[in-house]
Image (cartoon, helix red, strand yellow):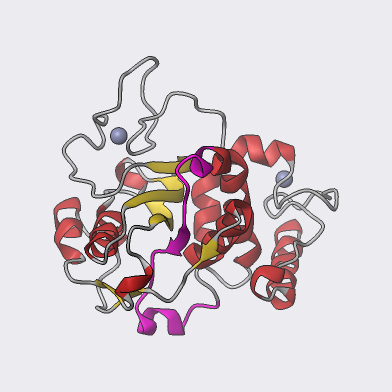
Amino acid sequence: MQALFQRTRRVAADLIQAGSAFVYPPACVHCGHDLSPSANGFCPACTDLIAPHQPDRCVRCSAPVGPHLDTTSGCIHCRTDPFAFERVVSLGVYEAALRELCIAAKHAGGHAVAAALGDLLAAREADGLREHNIDVVIPVPHHWFERLARPHLPPDVMARRLARSLRTNCDVHTLAKVKRTPQQSSLLPTERRNNLRGAFRVRQENLLRDRTVLLVDDVLTTGTTAHRATRELKSAGAKRVFVAVAARGIGRNA
Ligand SMILES: [Zn+2]
Ligand SMILES: [Zn+2]
């Protein structure tokens, strides 16, 4: 019954949202408890559950690592991956409540969840990201055919929320996905690395020259999607690209 109630509230939130004028339902989008009008989408208990404090993370890929490890050259999860972007920030590992929410964010009624994940990411990471002087926030794009059946796209929703927090522009048009590809999650890691060759294209190169970009996606696993998108942004003149994702996928659940 509570699940139905939550879902109804989420769908209602979808219906009343309109671009950046999005309004949260007055309840935690995870557990349904009442929230104060000034709160973001999650109550304090759910915030701790979804994104537990994890001080020891790889500075390159955001995977949790052992204490006091120097990860400036990466960690066991990313050292052999040639990332074109600078680094990744995330709320945590793609598992448990965070995994459930990333999946819920994709479905009808998931706009409020995606917005809440974007706001929580902004609350955690915006101060650090501001130090990099982000010029523009760009979501990882979907092919037009993939967009047809989706009520909303979590990376777009999250990117708008992050841009709002960083007081910068969100650009959902300049980077496009021009090739339909199998879902990365349906492929083996070796297949994932080849799947997205030539998939992204920048439509208007002069907009990105010397810009510092924050690229936003819901989940980063091998990093191939963000890497390929970053290469395209950089070939169009972008100076540096940072990546923000809700969750860092590691291992078999990702
Ligand atoms: Zn809650
Ligand atoms: Zn790493």
Is residue 8 visible from the viewing direction of this image? yes
Residue 198 in percent (x, y) is at 18, 71
Q: How many marks?
A: 0
Classify 160 as above or below 45.
Answer: below
Q: Nearer the viewer, residue 239 or 252?
A: 239
Q: Is residue 236 left or right of residue 47?
A: left
Classify 219 as above or below 252.
Answer: below
Q: Is residue 201 left or right of residue 146?
A: left
Q: Is residue 165 left or right of residue 245?
A: right
Residue 22 in percent (x, y) is at 70, 68
Classify 222 as above or below 152.
Answer: above
Give the farthest residue toward the top: 68
Q: Tell me the residue at 17%/56% (across/down).
A: 193
Q: Tell me the residue at 56%/28% (across/down).
A: 53
Classify 71 as above or below 87.
Answer: above
Q: Tell me the residue at 35%/65% (across/down).
A: 208
Q: Nearer the viewer, residue 121 or 209?
A: 209
User: Ligand 1 quadrant?
Assistant: top right
What is the magenta range? 128-151
Q: Quadrant of the N terminus?
A: bottom right
The answer to which image quadrant residue 64 occupies is top left
Residue 139 forms part of the magenta stretch: yes
Is residue 93 visible from the viewing direction of this image? no
Residue 140 in percent (x, y) is at 39, 64
Residue 23 forms part of the magenta stretch: no
Q: Tell me the residue at 51%/37% (across/down).
A: 128
Residue 203 in percent (x, y) is at 32, 78
